Image: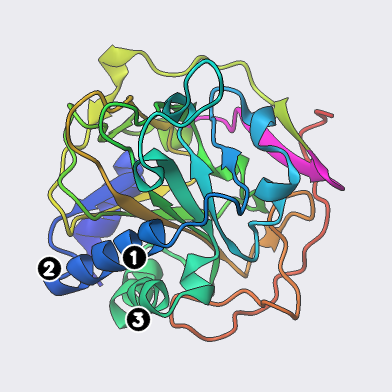
Amino acid sequence: MNSERRRRFDEDGYLVLPGFKPAHEVAALRHRTHELLAALDPHAGGGVFSTREPGRSADDWFLDSDCSVRCFFEEEAFDAQGRLTRPLPQAINKIGHALHDLDPVFDAFSHGPALTALAAELGLAQTQVWQSMLICKQPGIGGAVRWHQDATYFFTDPISVTTFWFALEDADVDNGCLWVEPGGHRGPLRERFVREGRQTRLLTLDDTPWPDTGRSTPLPCAAGTLVVFHGLLPHWSAANRSGRSRFAYTLHVTDARSVYDGRNWIQRGAMLPVRGLDGAVAPSGIAVAVDRTGAG
């Protein structure tokens, strides 16, 4: 166990690990991504992904992506008449949310001893991988992602969600790299995204302001880098106005020793059971409605 690395994670709320994934694995995932984008059916449906207006994502296409692989458009890929302004593969914001379970290439990338060992080092003893996303940040139109905390979407008691964010292409301040608030994971959970049947709501829990630029740090990194961060860490990314895409792949992982909330938008059953980072079916983690906030 790397005690210095654990100390930095506990202090800052994140780690930046260059070269965590070898170049051939990163290239294989990029190749598979382009295959998926090239195979898109323009008549298969889709949704526009927006973090500025979370309610816009609360439709059947979004909700049913919990146990499938679906594409979501960039907001700026359409003109005023609702027509695409670029080829379909260049209009996609993200692909999610069960790539790690349903696509063999993404499955291989998402599981293995190195990830399992890192998770254990950070305190995740019984991992559960609930969601995966391929985020494209398309050139010129890649949308901004507002300040948020990932525990908003994957609430457990106690909070255990940890994000594994892999750079598949070089990321910098010009094409929309991550920004974080170092140490911000010691603050409160500000919001909860809850599912009620076929509807979702974003609940305000705490009115602590989001960080300003003086308290945020950009995390430029090369392809192959893993950024791993605590579920309470505030983070965001700017719009991509450059001529370069910024492909990244993320996993959201909890610990089965904590209680996974029954109002989280993703729930898994016997048809597609949640698995750990080692690829094995994870302990179930009783999914019940836990509300310690008094909000909503």
Q: From the viewer's perspective, is residue 256 above or below residue 145?
A: below
Give the SS element for disc 2: helix
Under tag 3, what secondary structure? loop
The quadrant the C terminus occupies is: top right
Q: Which residue sits furthest bottom?
A: 280
The mark that comes first in sequence, 3 or 1, is 1
The amino acid type of the residue labelled 1 equals: Glu
* Residue depicted at x 66% and y 77%: 273
Q: Is residue 284 visible?
A: yes
For mark 1, what is the residue?
35
Magenta stretch bounds: 187-199
Q: Position of residue 123 (x, y in %)?
A: 43, 64
Give the numbered dot on residue 23: 2
- Residue at figure coordinates x 44%, y 37% from the top left: 185
Residue 125 seen in the figure: no
Q: Earlier in the sequence, mark 2 or mark 3?
A: 2
Residue under label 3, please give it.
Answer: 112
N-term mark: 1 or 2: 2
**Foreground: disc 1 or disc 2:** 1
Residue placed most toward the observer, 249 or 225: 249
Nearer the camera: disc 3 or disc 1? 1
Quarter residue 25 falls in = bottom left
* Position in image of residue 242 (x %, y %): 19, 27
- Distance (Cα) linking label 2 and label 3: 16 Å
Q: How many marks?
A: 3
Q: Residue 279's spot in the image, x, y percent?
A: 47, 83
Disc 3 marks a residue whose amino acid type is Gly
